[in-house]
Image (cartoon, helix red, strand yellow):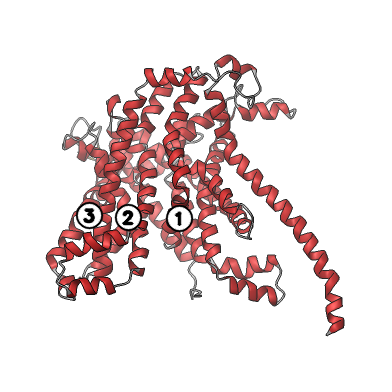
């Protein structure tokens, strides 16, 4: 036994040295990957603060000699960035609120109540996750056209809510299944109605998963492109994502202005990310791992 | 309790609004897409029934099949890139210091809109002022390609931002799954003398296979319906060289006003997405699921 130990020792140390070297190399790879992920955005920040001459003549990653905030001033006053921003904020907020409320209702009914078609209904919602929006786009365009909702932001609220319901329900499901039933049983014994139970007990108990689902929804709605691009033609009704796209079209040669517009359009998401990164990560993990 | 929780009125009140909403906004339009595919229709004059003409035109439309081929190329490349993401997640989950910060950094591009990403990469690929060609010239490469206007490289050029955008998303999914594996299992294997490579391939991979299946479906279906970034970056051009199914459908309907033909393409897209989902689940079906607690 003793000899076996001494035999093993050198092998173990050499492996741990190789292991440490290997780990070092792998660590460098991870950091390089992180740099690759960030570099384009750093470059964007830099050229948003330069004028064309500096962009064309100086090295790409040279710091701006003087910070040309006038690029930001130009696009903020010329484009309707403020208007787009407001549209994005309220459309996102209303549709996320609606989606969360409706999805909570459905998830509660599916996980807690007893009814015959619940499996079928759940199936309909889950298949919804795989449906490409493009396959529904032309009929939706026609339906909204007939209903007078083309060029109305109501069309966005409706489609965002409907298309986000499946994923939101999927995120909520796992949490609801794990929720203990004792509290509900006690409440019902005390004569509490289902509605009261849902709003006073269930919703507060699920607040953490609601926050997670809300953030995922928010990112999707904020970045949504095809519905706004198809349904909305009046410039002042557009959201930031699409408004920015049209606005950049007018400034194809002014790099600083384009950079500033892009920076302004991604800034809200970046700020939210800095504040809530843990929840976002958790939401993405929860959304698919459980599927 | 049972009585309260099987009250038909309450169930209807909780479920019907959402159910009607997804039926009206998702399922009815899907059926209508197939139906409109039987029509000649420019969205102005009334529809005209033309039977299966749109679908037979689809079969003979070379440009359409080119777009299908490009979508399939994206699906294959996206699936292959999962290997890269999985490798990163494996390393990251091995008690690396700063793993939490790193995976958040990887995620940032995923949070940005495809429009912003497309506009940014238009600048990166800019033939004279972009950083990519700037870098290539700096390391001494001459005749740098005009990435997005060269029909031979455009498809690959468009794929790079996709790779960049989705990295963090998949890494986070794999990381969460790997962290979910009970440490005792890995410890036991290590005590039995298994190497890190053996642990990765024999223990970790089989245990997260369910998650890998989900990500393959996500990557394939996601690629088949990929649209925003390509539409903004190239519009499918030059000369259709980066056209994918969704952009071909969009251009047919909303540019050329061929809504009937566009619907036929949309219907085909739906069918191929559902078949791909079903097919992948079928191919990767395991007889017994591994359970650990």
State the separation of the CA atoms marked 2 and 1. Answer: 18 Å
Check if mark 2's residue and mark 1's residue have beta carbons within 8 Å: no
Locate the N terminus of chain A by quadrant: bottom right
Q: Nearer the viewer, residue A34 or A204?
A: A204
Circle 3 — which element? helix
Q: Kindly report which numbered mark, 3 or 1, lies closer to the viewer in this rendering.
A: 1
Q: Position of residue B173 (x, y in %)?
A: 50, 56
Circle 1 — which element? helix
Q: Nearer the viewer, residue A197 or A53?
A: A197
Q: Where does label 3 land, which residue?
A: B18
Q: Is residue B237 visible?
A: no
Q: Where does label 1 land, which residue?
A: A282
State the separation of the CA atoms marked 3 and 1. Answer: 26 Å
What residue is rendered at 37% in x and 21% in y? A79
What residue is rendered at 28% in x and 40% in y? A138
Query: In which chain is the residue bearing label 3?
Result: B
Q: Of all residues shown, which one is farthest toward the left?
A: B9
Q: Quadrant of residue A43?
A: top right
Q: Of all residues shown, which one is farthest toward the bottom?
A: A1
Residue A222 in the image: above or below residue B204:
above
Position of residue A172 in the picture relative to residue A285 (left or right) = left
Locate the C terminus of chain A by quadrant: bottom left
Q: Residues within 10 Å of mark 2 (few under 14, many from 20)?
A: many
Query: In which chain is the residue bearing label 2?
Result: A
Q: Are marks 3 and 2 on the same chain?
A: no
Q: Position of residue A139 (x, y in %)?
A: 25, 42
Position of residue A170 in the picture relative to residue B3 (left or right) = right
What residue is rendered at 25% in x and 32% in y? B42
Q: Of all residues shown, which one is farthest toward the front?
A: A190
Which mark is drawn over residue A166?
2
């Amino acid at each position: 036994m003793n000899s076996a130990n001494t035999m093993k020792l050198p092998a173990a140390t050499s492996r741990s040295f190789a292991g440490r070297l290997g780990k070092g190399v792998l660590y460098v790879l991870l950091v390089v990957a992180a740099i690759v992920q960030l570099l384009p955005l750093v470059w964007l920040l830099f050229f948003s603060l330069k004028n064309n001459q500096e962009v064309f003549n100086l090295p790409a990653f040279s710091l701006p000699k003087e910070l040309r905030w006038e690029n930001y001033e130009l696009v903020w006053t010329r484009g309707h960035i403020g208007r787009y921003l407001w549209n994005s904020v309220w459309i996102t907020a209303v549709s996320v609120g609606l989606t969360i409320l409706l999805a909570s209702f459905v998830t509660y009914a599916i996980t807690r109540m007893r009814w015959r078609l619940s499996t079928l209904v759940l199936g309909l919602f889950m298949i919804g996750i795989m449906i490409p929006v493009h396959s529904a786009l032309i009929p939706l365009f026609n339906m909204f056209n007939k209903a007078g909702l083309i060029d109305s932001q109501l069309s966005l609220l409706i489609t965002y809510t409907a298309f986000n319901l499946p994923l939101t329900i999927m995120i909520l499901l796992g949490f609801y299944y794990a929720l203990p039933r004792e509290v509900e049983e006690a409440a019902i014994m005390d004569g509490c109605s289902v509605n009261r139970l849902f709003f006073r007990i269930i919703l507060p108990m699920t607040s953490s998963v609601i926050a997670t689902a809300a953030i995922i929804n928010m990112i999707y709605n904020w970045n949504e492109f095809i519905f706004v691009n198809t349904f909305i033609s009046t410039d002042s009704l557009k959201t930031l994502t699409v408004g920015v796209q049209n606005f950049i079209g007018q400034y194809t040669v002014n790099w600083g202005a384009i950079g500033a517009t892009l920076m302004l359009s991604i800034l809200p998401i970046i700020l939210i990310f800095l504040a809530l990164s843990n929840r976002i990560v958790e939401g993405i993990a929860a959304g698919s791992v459980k599927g | 309790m049972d009585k309260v929780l099987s009250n038909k009125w309450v169930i209807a009140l909780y479920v019907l609004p959402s159910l009607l909403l997804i039926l009206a906004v998702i399922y009815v339009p899907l059926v209508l897409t197939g139906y409109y595919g039987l029509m000649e229709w420019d969205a102005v004059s009334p529809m005209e029934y033309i039977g299966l003409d749109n679908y037979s035109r689809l079969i003979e439309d070379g440009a359409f099949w080119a777009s299908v081929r490009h979508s399939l190329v994206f699906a294959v490349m996206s699936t292959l890139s999962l290997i890269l993401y999985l490798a990163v997640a494996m390393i990251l989950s091995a008690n690396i210091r700063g793993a939490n910060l790193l995976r958040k950094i990887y995620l940032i591009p995923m949070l940005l809109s495809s429009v912003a990403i497309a506009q940014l990469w238009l600048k990166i690929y800019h033939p004279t002022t972009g950083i990519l060609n700037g870098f290539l010239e700096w390391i001494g490469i001459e005749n740098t390609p005009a990435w997005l206007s060269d029909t031979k490289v455009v498809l690959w050029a468009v794929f790079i931002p996709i790779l960049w955008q989705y990295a963090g998303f998949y890494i986070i999914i794999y990381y969460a799954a790997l962290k979910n594996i009970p440490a005792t299992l890995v410890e036991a294997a290590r005590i039995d003398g298994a190497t890190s490579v053996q642990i990765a391939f024999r223990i970790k991979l089989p245990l997260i296979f369910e998650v890998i299946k989900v990500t393959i479906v996500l990557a394939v279906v996601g690629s088949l319906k990929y649209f925003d970034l390509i539409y903004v970056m190239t519009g499918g051009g030059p000369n259709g060289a980066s056209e994918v199914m969704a952009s071909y459908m969009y251009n047919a309907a909303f540019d050329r006003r061929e809504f009937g033909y566009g619907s036929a393409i949309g219907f085909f897209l739906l069918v191929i997405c559902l078949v791909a989902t079903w097919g992948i689940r079928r191919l990767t079906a395991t007889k017994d699921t591994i359970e650990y607690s």
